[in-house]
Amino acid sequence: MPNASDDLFTREDPIFANKELLEINHLPGEGRIVGRDDEIANLATAVNPAIFGQSPSNVLIYGKTGTGKSLCAKYVSQRLVETAEEEGVKATFAYVDCAQDTTETQAVQTIADSVNDVDVTSIKVPDKGLSTSTYYKRLWRILDALYDVVLIILDEIDKLSDDDILMQLSRAGEAGKISGCKLGVIGISNKIQYKDRMDERVKSSLCEREFVFPPYDANQLRDIMDARSDAFREGVLDPSTIPRAAALAAREHGDARKAIDILRYAGEIAQSMGAATVKENFVTQARQRAETDRFRELIRGSTPHSRYVLQALAILSLSNQQQDGFRTSRVYEVYENICRQQGSDSLSLRRVRDLLKEHAFLDIIEQSKHSGGSAEGSYTKHQLLEDPDVVKDVLTESVDA
């Protein structure tokens, strides 16, 4: 009698040869970073003094999600460490995801832990339990004990709760906190207006060099996906699949992450359907799935009322497709109707304003200030950045679950 498990699992993947190449967190090799030659060269010039043990420039990088900011920062930092070693300079870099480590204490603990070698320093950096100042003292001791130069990448820097760590890092040498080690900071933000709310002293220290990463165009997106096409088995990609995915992504957002997601999902759709090739028509289905999954991830863990507010904006967007945004009062009216339908008491207008701000912070919606003149005064309009159909579908699904 054949083993029942024989038919349950596929022992050889007919579509993917190396699926890891299509994962967002996969750092491509040198030949796989496409369309960012100028940005890489500019960033390398800014930090170049570090290979001689001198202070690198502090850098602020702006650009929309999926424009290669983190990728290029990590790549240049890694190359710098390797080149510095050839020059007899001890260098390293630390990466902090500020969306996860939002407080000063969390961020400095992550940095200290990632650059430490406890066998050499005998300095322990526990996950928690120390004061912020103690974490800093241990970090300064580690840096002076182990390195000549350290680069610190602060990704999504706008998610930090305050500027305190930027002040400490950008002025550590000047303040005499470290004596034998030079420190450079690479700040990365999706928000071009982030600098406007920075402390002036931090701004003068941190913004020595600023670079803007533009969205990718269709040709660059096609090259990016071509460079990762060996994620698939030979011959399974229809010739029109990558150009179609690139054109779609370029028209909508120029986001390489989303483009790669679409390509991966198209492969998974082919897999689930038992198709021998990844066809062009799978791309449209894949785009919908990628958008849905991304939005589902964004609102995971959000409260019912947080979802009701988004649902109200989705309803308004679908019924008024020519309108570019809706006033808070209009969103609140629809929100109250949804609460009644759900048998729930509505929150105050002030609290709904706060929820809308939270969604703007996550880049789910965009807020804009308007002036209604002396009669009306100023007011805020809110516009969904996500596809309203996707928002409505995911929110309906979360209510049913």
Image (cartoon, rainbow, N blue to C red):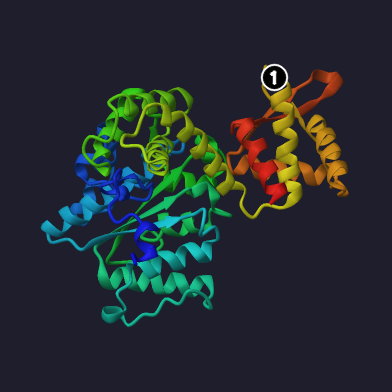
Vertically, is 101 above or below 188?
below
Name the foreground residue: 18 vs 259: 18
Q: Residue at x 22, y 51 (%)?
A: 80
Image position, residue 63 (x, y; %): 44, 35
Horizontal arrangement in the rendering, residue 176 relative to residue 238 (left or right): right
Which residue type carries mark 1? Answer: Gln
Horizontal arrangement in the rendering, residue 86 relative to residue 202 (left or right): left
Secondary structure category for the residue under label 1: loop
Residue that numbered label 1 is attached to: 323
Image position, residue 361 (x, y; %): 61, 43
Vertically, is 9 above or below 391?
below
Q: Residue at x 40, y 61 (%)?
A: 172
Image position, residue 82 (x, y; %): 17, 55
Tell me the quarter of the picture where residue 237 sits: top left
Q: Is residue 254 visible?
A: no
Horizontal arrangement in the rendering, residue 64 relative to residue 179 (left or right): right
Vertically, is 115 above or below 347?
below
Q: Quadrant of the N terminus?
A: bottom left
Vertically, is 153 above or below 261?
below
Image position, residue 192 (x, y; %): 50, 35
Q: Is residue 106 visible?
A: yes
Name the foreground residue: 6 vs 186: 6
